[in-house]
Amino acid sequence: MGALNTFPVSVKVEGQRIVIVGGGAEALNKARLAIKTTAEVVIVSRHLEDDFSALPVTVRNRPVVPCDMFGAAMVFVADHGEDGALAQRLARLAGVPLNVVDVPQQCDFYTPSIIDRAPLSIAIASEGEAPVLARLVRARIEAMLSPDLGAVARLAGSLRDRVASLLSKPQARRFYEALVTTPSPDVEALLDSHRGEAAGIVWLIGAGPGAEDLLTLRAQRLLQEADVIVHDHLVPDAVVEMGRRDAERISVGKKKGHHSFTQAQINALIVRLAGEGKRVARLKSGDPMVFGRAGEEIAALRKAGIAYGIVPGVSAALAAAADTATPVTLRKVSTGLVFATAHGADNDELDHWAALAGAGLTLALYMGKSIAGPVAGRLLARGLSPQTPVGIVVNAGRADRSLHAGMLGELAADDIRLSDGPAIIFIGAAVAAGDWQDAAQIAVRTFKVA
């Protein structure tokens, strides 16, 4: 995600002037936009080519002068001749924000495409790079929003003092959410329903493999509703930032070899936060129910009598299968898929894995990158064929993923160095049906991905 060169803000223009220098079509278009505000709109031009008489604006049919800049909130220059150049210099000297129409590099600010539901406004801007795209996005959002939103916004504004005196901040936030999403709301009934102690809840949310567009719609919605986001180390910042801007964010920093929070501490944290009446998004990489320690957190929530919900996510093995078009279940080849973690696997488990893979099931091993070779060797010792196909995906589902493919015997024999990040190791005949043509061959000793 690229960084913005502009900071989106709404500029207060009440009691001030918006000055537009120019008398042609460009000036008229800016005037039509400016009159939607409560500012005084002033047109300054020696050459009035278009008719401004139908607009509630002040027209000064003369050259621009320094006093035109006094009390101006912003200046639009739609004259590209000498008068326009003079207006630019005067605006700079007066320190008034300047927009030179259709010359982005000379602009202090850009005019967005605006959706007007006063007092609610939505602006879509492209920093002057793609105004047509901004207008198309505006049209799509416009079609989604009810014309009555402005009335709802005014109602919410009229209730601010009363709501603040009756409800706590978490209660007030939930009241407003109910107010704006309920058709023909009964204000008194909503106020009564939000009084008293707020009931906290914890949502265990799967963040998927890290790509924002693989997050579910439900996960996005609940992140916007959460008061607190408790997230693991592997969850990218871009996903965490999909939460409400004023939500508290707590990183519990769980990664291999570096546990800033123990699982017991995480359990106590989410119980305490929900006990305070907060809505907690417990954001986990992948799916919370697949190696996400969700069982322990659910047990703690149940014991404390805290409400909870589960939101599934795309587990890393499924993302890895998609990245490589690997049909992990394939008719007449693989009748099933086994999720397992390679760490701490004992002899009985390895015997079981070898039997399953030998019978045609696909193994998806998590958290086994550092011990891939030894595990492969132990599977060979239990009778699995050295020719069994193997595929490894590091950072599945992400732009920086890397692929490695070969045979089980090669994996057991070689010192494999993989790029940083979590890895999924597929073992089984179905792996050969995937698209691994761009994969590095694991038979190459000490192969390293930069």
Image (tube, helix red, strand yellow):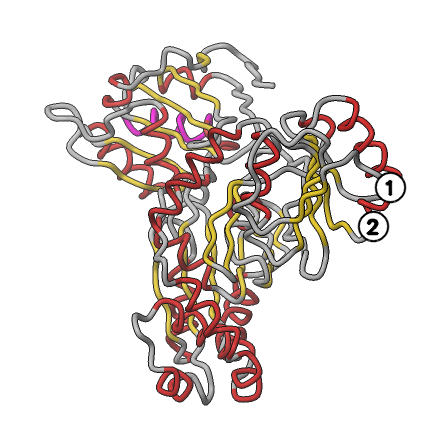
The x and y percentages for residue 328 are 24, 29
CB under 8 Å between discs 1 and 2: yes
Main SS, magenta region, reads: helix
Q: Which mark is residue 242?
A: none
Residue picked out by circle 2: 70
* Quarter that holds the N terminus: top right
Query: In terms of image quadrants, where is residue 181?
Result: bottom left
Q: Looking at the picture, which amino acid does disc 1 mark?
A: Pro
At horizontal 51% and vertical 69% (from top left) the residue drawn is 270
Residue sitting nearer the eye, 350 or 297: 297
Question: Left of 384 or right of it: where is 160?
Answer: right
Task: From this view, report whether residue 241 is shown above or below residue 84.
Answer: below
Q: Is residue 235 visible in the rendered structure shown here?
A: no
Q: Looking at the picture, which amino acid does disc 2 mark?
A: Phe
Q: Helix or strand or loop: what does disc 1 sit on?
A: helix
Question: Left of 165 or right of it: where is 352?
Answer: left
The x and y percentages for residue 321 are 32, 29
Query: In terms of image quadrants, where is residue 62?
Result: top right
Q: Which mark is residue 66?
A: 1
Q: Is residue 186 magenta?
A: no
Q: Helix or strand or loop: what does disc 2 sit on?
A: loop
